[in-house]
Amino acid sequence: MTDKMNNVRWFSMALKALIVLAENESRCPSGKLAEKLESQSVYLRKILTHLVKAEIIGAKEGRDGGYSLSRKPEDIKLSEVYETIRAETVTKDYFETEGKHCFSSVSQQSLFNLQQEMESWIMEGLQTKTLADLIKR
């Protein structure tokens, strides 16, 4: 359960960080970003690392360094952020059927199929949204 919740928190924090960066005129250092988001810098940098690798944001080191968007907010799909951040699906283990449960193989397969369908719904919904939909210009 903790891993699943971490994925949800990471996705939420990634979206919040992207909103702050979209609304910021210049690069934003991780410390300042963490302060605005009321988060710990170390925790936030782990999330930002994934966004940098996916080229959603850029990072510059040094005195005038910090993070900034690599693309316009309307070009950043929320599904891309979701895919970048998640280590595993958010819905994974919603319907845990392994172990000493009394589920038949048919029930286990049905729950697995529902889990896959839920993941599909999430991705379909996020495909239609961009970062620009979350900010006011």
Image (cartoon, grey):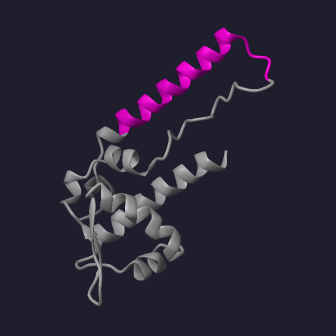
Quadrant occupied by the C terminus:
bottom left
Q: Give the left or right position of residue 60, taking residue 7 as reference.
A: left
Q: How many marks?
A: 0
Tell me where the magenta segment starts and ends, as one range: 101-125
Quadrant occupied by the N terminus:
top right
State which quadrant residue 9 falls in. bottom right
State which quadrant residue 112 falls in. top right
Q: Nearer the viewer, residue 63 or 35?
A: 63
Q: Give the left or right position of residue 60, taking residue 2 as reference.
A: left
In the rendered image, residue 34, in percent from the top left (x then y), is placed at: 46, 76
In the rendered image, residue 114, in percent from the top left (x then y), is placed at: 54, 22
Q: State whether residue 1 is above or below residue 24.
A: above
Which residue: 34% across, 63% down? Answer: 18
Which residue: 52% across, 68% down? Answer: 43
Residue 107 in magenta?
Answer: yes
Q: Residue furthest bottom?
A: 63
In the rendered image, residue 33, in percent from the top left (x then y), is placed at: 41, 76
Tell me the chief SS of the magenta region. helix
In the rendered image, residue 2, in percent from the top left (x then y), is placed at: 66, 50
